[in-house]
Image (tube, rainbow, N blue to C red):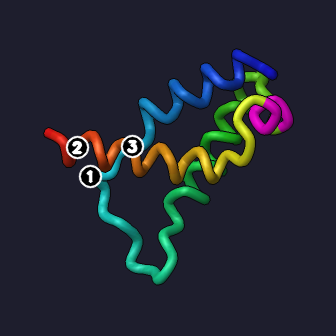
Amino acid sequence: MSQRAIDFVNNWIGSNVDTTKPADMEHHDRRPHRLAEKCAKDAEAAGITEGEIKDGLGDLEVCMIAAIDRVALAKADK
């Protein structure tokens, strides 16, 4: 497991996942997919492979779904 991949993704989520942005007007919310793609691209630029992320966190899109839910819950609790 790559702790640097886990730390990168967690920090990336903290800086990039925001539920105040309007949801897509599509039937299926594409934000998790787009966030996962951007995170993977930014990780690659930082020298972290998708394999490292997958080993440490599993499916990046699932991580983004969970992150969006956590942010939404945190905002609802305020």
- Residue 66: x, y in percent? 50, 47
Q: Which residue is mark 2?
A: 75
Precedes in sequence: disc 3 or disc 1: 1
Label 3 with label 2: CB-CB less than 8 Å = no
The secondary structure type at the circle numbered 2 is helix
Q: CA distance from mark 1 to mark 2?
A: 9 Å
Residue behind mark 1 = 20
Per the image, label 1 sits on a secondary structure element best described as: loop
Start and end of the magenta stretch? 51-55
- Judge whether 20 appears above or below 10 on screen: below
User: In terms of image quadrants, where is residue 17?
Assistant: top left
Disc nearest the viewer among 1 and 2? 2
State the SS at label 3: helix
Q: Which mark is residue 70?
A: 3
Q: Name the residue type under label 3.
A: Arg
Question: Left or right: where does residue 38 sit relative to residue 65?
Answer: right
Q: Is residue 67 left or right of residue 42?
A: left
At a point 53% along the width and 67% down the height, the residue shown is: 30
